[in-house]
Image (spheres, coloured by chain):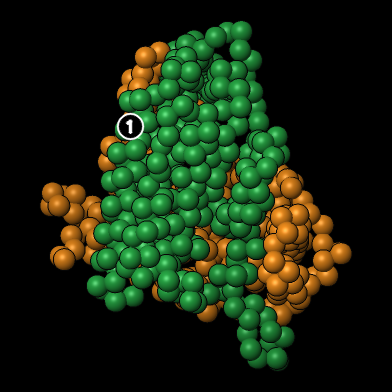
Amino acid sequence: MQSSPLEKACVRYSEYVRSDFEVAIKNWAVDMRLADVHSVIGGLLARQSVLGAEFSLQSNLWNFSVGPLFMSAMVEIRVNMSWLYIDPEPRCRKFLLYGLGQEKLELEYKRSLDHPLESTRSQESWLNSQRNEIFTDVNVGTWSGKTVKEMAIEANIADSSLLHSALASIVHSGWDHVFQIYLDRPGTLDAKAQLPADNGKIEFLLSSARVLDETFSAFLQFTNQGFKPTAYRYLEKQIRHQTKDGN
Amino acid sequence: METENFEKLMSVFAAYGETLLGDLERVLSDWPTRFDEPHVRRVLGGLLCRQVNFSIHITSAPGLWNEQMAPLLLRPMLETHLKVAWILEDPITRSAGIAKADLIGAITKIQRLEESTREPGENDNSWLSENAKKQVALFERELSLFDPEKKPIMIESRQMAQKLGGRAQEYYRSYQVRFSSVVHSTWYHLLRFNLISDPNPLHRFQLIPMYPEIGFDFMPALAAADFCDKTFSSLNEVKVETINGPLENLLEDLKQIGAINRIEKS
């Protein structure tokens, strides 16, 4: 099957994302006293790169029904990382401990559901290898104790919080989203439920690439690297050319 | 996976998608009279379409069949399932209550944005684009359709699962933490997929960030079909006529091509 120029550009873009990530991590001098900072921030950059690259390869996701689910996850990483940079050591530790608490919560759920002992035992060992279960607290709120909006404002990226807030009702299938997309005549009493056409919009691809690029720029600034990532510049140029050529 | 096996797998999921769409059409056209109160029909019908849409997206996109991506759609499927099951316990009050709360929340969000961005001396609404004004007007029109006597109901998925109890709570407890860790990219997820231990003891087995190989396993597609089936079944429990969800056909087809046997053996 022949790929379209856009599909080829997306494959190339995803390769650039991966190589940008590898260069950025390789150039980051490791300070052994700050192991948590390195793992948490580096892990988040890896996750953001995977999301950005994989989303670009799935054009059937670039629509209002599901595109925002990926966008929201990416914006949240962008905000979390920027908030971590302000005071990295204690905040990365907080992020890590919250995650371990989630591990403990899942274990408690499994125990309450009488899961096979084998599966809970292996998870117990996994958790205990990082921090003894009895010393691990479960927190069912947010990891930072703040909302995404509060973190974004503190990190001076309030625009990200606006975007995150706009996507929230889509992520949770709120009626303010569902009635607009899944009713044939929104705002009328005799409207009938229907599946949407889900036409692909390239704006979703560009937005996700922009969020990823912002994440990289902030990371490179935090780690004092002069390296310029290539992925976004490549994609933006390709799309501009292809739109001009009418492809 | 070999090309031939992959093509067989895709044709099985394509057949599933067609059956599912047929079932959805049937449910919507033979909507049970007892749920024919307009708000109930609109809200439950809309959520059912949302659930089917999620399932079609996952089952038709093999690029999503991995632990890195699929839970981003599976978690809203879990939430939608809980929402439908919770509404069905008191359809008239809850369909209106949850819809009103969402609409009021959306209008308030736009109004707060207006207040926070309004500069002294400027035209009060100068910032508000035509699009945002249209959006508010549409939300208000939609809100006016609901009975003013019905109170808005704000409720989280965790509370819904708790109130529903039984199997709904089991689903929540089985999947929520894992799915949420992918949605919010928590340490739980990073440690499993984005970090690898440095084998050098001189580096104190430090965790190194890595770009992982993206796996391929159709289990997330099967999970999506399963969630969709659960939602259809919860409607089934309160409907007079029976809906035969396409999950059974899907499982049978997967057995036919040997896909399920391979899993059982492994």
Q: How many tags in the picture? A: 1
Q: Residue B259: x percent and y percent?
A: 38, 69
Which chain does the orange colour mark? A
Apparent side of residue A175 relative to residue B49 in the rendered image (left or right): right
Which chain does the green colour mark? B
Q: Nearer the viewer, residue A63 or B145?
A: B145
- Compared to residue B143, the image places residue A228 above or below, namely below
Image quarter where the N terminus of chain A lies is bottom left
The residue at the far left in this view is A245
**Residue with the mark numbered 1:** B26
Q: Please, what secondary structure does the residue beneath circle 1 have? A: helix
Q: State which quadrant residue A65 falls in.
A: top left
Q: Residue B122: x percent and y percent?
A: 51, 17
Q: Residues within 10 Å of mark 1 (few under 14, many from 20)?
A: few
Apparent side of residue B105 relative to residue A130 in the rendered image (left or right): left
Q: Residue A128: x percent and y percent?
A: 78, 72
Residue shown at 67% from the left, 36% from the top: B164
Q: Residue A62: x percent and y percent?
A: 34, 47
The residue at the far right in this view is A134
Chain letter for the residue marked with disc 1 in the picture: B
Residue shown at 56% from the left, 70% from the top: B194
Residue B174 appears in the picture as rendered = yes
Residue A66 appears in the picture as rendered = no
Apparent side of residue A58 relative to residue B158 in the rendered image (left or right): left
- Compared to residue A103, the image places residue B5 above or below, namely below
- Compared to residue B235, the image places residue B38 above or below, namely above
Q: State which quadrant residue A106 falls in.
A: bottom right
Q: Nearer the viewer, residue B137 or A120?
A: A120
Disc 1 residue type (three-letter): Arg
Residue shown at 55% from the left, 45% from the top: B78
